Amino acid sequence: MIFRGRYITSEEAERIRLVNGVFPADEFHKCVLESSNNLAGGSPNPLTLLKQEITACFETKDAVEGIQASAESVNLFSIGNRILYM
């Protein structure tokens, strides 16, 4: 999506595994609860490790600078190790 600059459908998002599931609007709440219960019923160890890895991604220098630039409404992009402001 980012590189192609186009929107994708919910079905395509599911097909490429960007999302875990696509639900009809009238069944959304029920399906989300079922999915949440399945996660909650599993071992907490994989979820704990996953949360730690996601948190670590947001603590990198690039992520911190990107988040700060976004908060300041600055256009920012990076090439290799160089951060460029526009």
Image: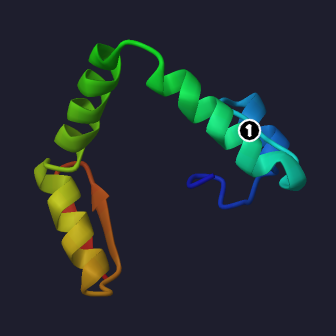
Work out which quarter of the rendered image holds the C terminus and state it.
bottom left
Q: Is residue 56 visible?
A: yes
Q: Count the marks: how many?
A: 1
Residue at horizontal 24%, vertical 48%?
Answer: 80
SS assignment at label 1: helix
**How far across and down, in percent of the image, does residue 56 sit?**
17, 39
Q: Is residue 50 above or below residue 7?
A: above
Nearer to me, 27 or 64 = 27
Coloring basis for residues: rainbow
Nearer to me, 72 or 29 = 29
Residue 5: name its quadrant: bottom right
Q: Is residue 85 visible?
A: no
Q: Residues within 10 Å of mark 1 (few under 14, many from 20)?
A: some
Toward the bottom, the furthest residue is: 73
Residue 20: name its quadrant: top right
Q: Is residue 46 above or below residue 33?
A: above
Is 81 on the left-hand or right-hand side of 42?
left
**How far across and down, in percent of the image, does residue 83 sit?**
20, 64
Three-letter amino acid code at the position of disc 1: Cys
Is 56 on the left-hand or right-hand side of 70?
left
Q: Is residue 75 above or below residue 31?
A: below
Residue at horizontal 57%, vertical 52%?
Answer: 3
**How far across and down, in percent of the image, does residue 4 sit?**
66, 53
Nearer to me, 33 or 72 = 33
Q: Which residue is disc 1 drawn over? A: 31
Nearer to me, 19 or 45 = 45
